[in-house]
Image: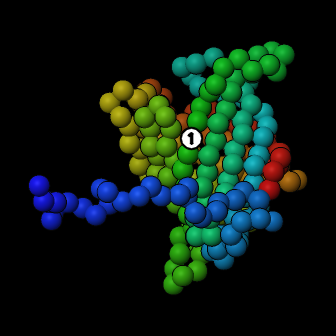
Amino acid sequence: MSENPLQPPWLNAPPVEEYPFEESHDLRVGPKLHPALDALLPYIGLWRGRGKGGFPTIEDFDYAQEIRISHDGRPFLHYESRAWILDEQSKPVRPAGREVGWWRPVLVDGRATDELEALLTTPTGVMELHLGKRTGTQLEFATDAVIRTPTAKEVTGGHRLFGIVEGALLYAQEMAAMGHGLSPHLSARLVRVGG
């Protein structure tokens, strides 16, 4: 039997090695930081700390969180967050929220402006497109669009404020969901543990 001339060549190609390009949350190793990210440099790193959460539809809770902000030499940052609920003795109870996404400065003629775009996705079926602005070491984002899977909770909007204060990463997040307008949801202080 003859070979199918329409068969794509990659069907019988040999396996490939692992991803060959480095990504780093540590500026001492890995690729050179893209110049468009210079103003966001203070955020790059591995951060860990504690926060307080709540919403009109749930009881308040304490949590711990780890955020990794890394780059691969291109003009955007990779953002990854994972949190876990803490009990009254600060012991882990269970996993909590997770997010992955991208922060991008808006470029004009190849140069970064103070405007930012962020795309954040959760495993619970919510994807948020945020537009924002950088002022010094403060970042402020508000949702431009929210997309949900049919089984996701009804999240309709959000607002986030990030800042580097005395070397720590602080943030506050408001959320509009479940018939409630923007309400305080999460706030935390994280310290740099890597990078």
Residue 151: % across, % down: 36, 26
- In the depicted structure, whether residue 194 falls above or below residue 179: below
- In the depicted structure, whether residue 121 falls above or below residue 15: above
Residue 140: % across, % down: 62, 55
* Residue at (53, 75) in percent of width and height: 107
Residue 25: % across, % down: 72, 57
* Residue at (38, 42) in percent of width and height: 147
* Residue located beneath label 1 in the image: 99
Q: Dot 1, crowdedness within 10 Å: few (<14), some or many (≥20)?
A: some
Secondary structure under tag 1 reads strand
* Residue at (69, 59) in percent of width and height: 24
Q: Quadrant of the N terminus?
A: bottom left
The residue lying toward the viewer, choosing from 99 and 88, is: 99
Q: Quadrant of the C terminus?
A: bottom right
The residue positioned farthest toward the bottom in the image shown? 109
- In the depicted structure, whether residue 134 falls above or below residue 167: below
The residue lying toward the viewer, choosing from 110 and 172, is: 110
Q: Is residue 3 visible?
A: yes
* Residue at (70, 73) in percent of width and height: 32
Q: Callout 1, which amino acid?
A: Glu
What is the number of callouts on the image? 1
Residue 2: % across, % down: 12, 59
